[in-house]
Amino acid sequence: MGKLSESAPTSAGLEEVVISTSKICFIDGVNGRLLYRGYDVLELAEKSSFEEVAYLLWYHCLPRQTEFQAFLDGFSGSLDLPIETIMILRMFPKVATPMEVLRTAVSSLGHWDPDSGNTRLDACLRKAQRITERIPLLISAMQRLRSGHEPVKPIDNQSIAYNFLYTLHNREPEATLVKAFDSALILHADHELNASTFAARVTASTMADLYSSVTSAIGTLKGPLHGGANIEVMRVLKEIEKTEKVESWVRQRLQNKKKIPGFGHRVYRCEDPRVAPLRQQARQCAELVGNLHFYELTRALEKTVTNLTGLFPNVDLYSASLYHAMEIPEELFTPIFAMSRVVGWTSHIFEQWRQNRLIRPRAEYVGPASLSYVPIQERDSKTEPQ
């Protein structure tokens, strides 16, 4: 059977295939740079806030003071989860994973959104704000219910980072932890056409609604090859236990030809630019809480793997020990990824709608092409296709 066409080469995983233009995110995989709408993510993580970055991604520019205040005021109506959503959270079986709960809960939010059926851009921007504000509340409420506690009401006029830590632990978080968590949210906010963002754009290209597109992204993020790497990093650190065991563990892993989570990237040919600030924040937070164990293990793992393989760390390596210092359970690491990336997903959904063309790639058929039908009573093993 011939190929689809001579002008349509196949690419497993769509690697290096460019399917769209975008003004949202630029990745320089050779020099290790990441830009959101022209701004270096390292500068944004240091000087900006997650809310301001959301504004940047949605509205294409940084806000003036009055614009930003009005934008923040728009979040105030989303500080409470719908009572129906809380009821749904109470109904999940204990075996349901946090990502399964989040996927269903986010989908349910659309039913009680006052702009649910409104497809105007201003309404969709309001929906994006509500989703962004409510995903952290869903995660903390879900975790508290799973632990036998009641959800905690967030504090007015506080940041998303502050309120997540506050509603998760039911205590005022340290300012250093809030700043580090806010920076981590910024660093994870977008990363061009990763698997979940692509899924969101594919769904959006059918002109499905915002909640359906975001739910598609969450379902894609649930896969361990995309969103679960920092969970695997934490499991590795617990398995290694001591810094003196790191080298022998790494050598054994390499001998068994197994991947080491937290290293390597499909795009970057150098160190992921998000690693440096996460490394610094992980150390600061570990020092603050008086427990450097997992940070030091991570540092030893980084040095050993890089020396033995030449592989560079990626964004997942230090986010594990950073979140551990914040007392965030590892089963919430992937939901937190969604909590941050939702501003990127929604930005890409809006961009897809503005320049929409239904995403419909082709597959190269490599199966048989000239089989003849044999009645079932006449079939035997010899007539079955190989």
Image: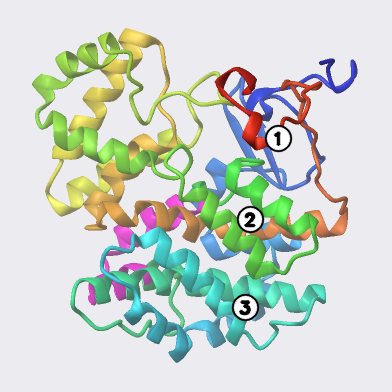
Where does label 3 land, which residue?
69
3 and 1 marks in contact (CB < 8 Å): no
In the rendered image, the quadrant that contains the C terminus is: top right
Which is nearer the eye, 212 or 160?
A: 212
Q: CA distance from mark 2 to mark 1?
A: 50 Å
Mark 2 or mark 3: which comes first in sequence? Answer: 3
Q: Quadrant of residue 365?
A: top right
Q: Residue at x 41, y 57 (%)?
A: 336
Residue 368 position within the rendered picture, expressed as x and y whole percent measured from the top left: 74, 21
Residue 83 position within the rendered picture, expressed as x and y whole percent measured from the top left: 44, 91
Callout 2 crowding tier (Cα within 10 Å): few <14, some 14–19, many ≥20? many
Q: Is residue 249 left or right of residue 161?
A: left
Where does label 1 land, which residue?
375
Q: Quadrant of residue 245?
A: top left
Residue 153 position within the rendered picture, expressed as x and y whole percent measured from the top left: 35, 85
Mark 3 or mark 1: which comes first in sequence? Answer: 3
Residue 179 included in the magenta stretch of the image: yes
Where does label 2 land, which residue?
345
In the rendered image, the quadrant that contains the N terminus is: top right
Q: Residue at x 66, y 88 (%)?
A: 114
Callout 3 crowding tier (Cα within 10 Å): few <14, some 14–19, many ≥20? few
Three-letter residue code for mark 2:
Trp
Three-letter residue code for mark 3:
Gln
Label of residue 289 in the image: none
Instruction: Give the SS element for disc 2.
Output: helix
Q: Is residue 61 visible?
A: no
Instruction: Give the SS element for disc 3.
Output: helix
Residue 159 included in the magenta stretch of the image: no
The region drawn magenta spans 164-186
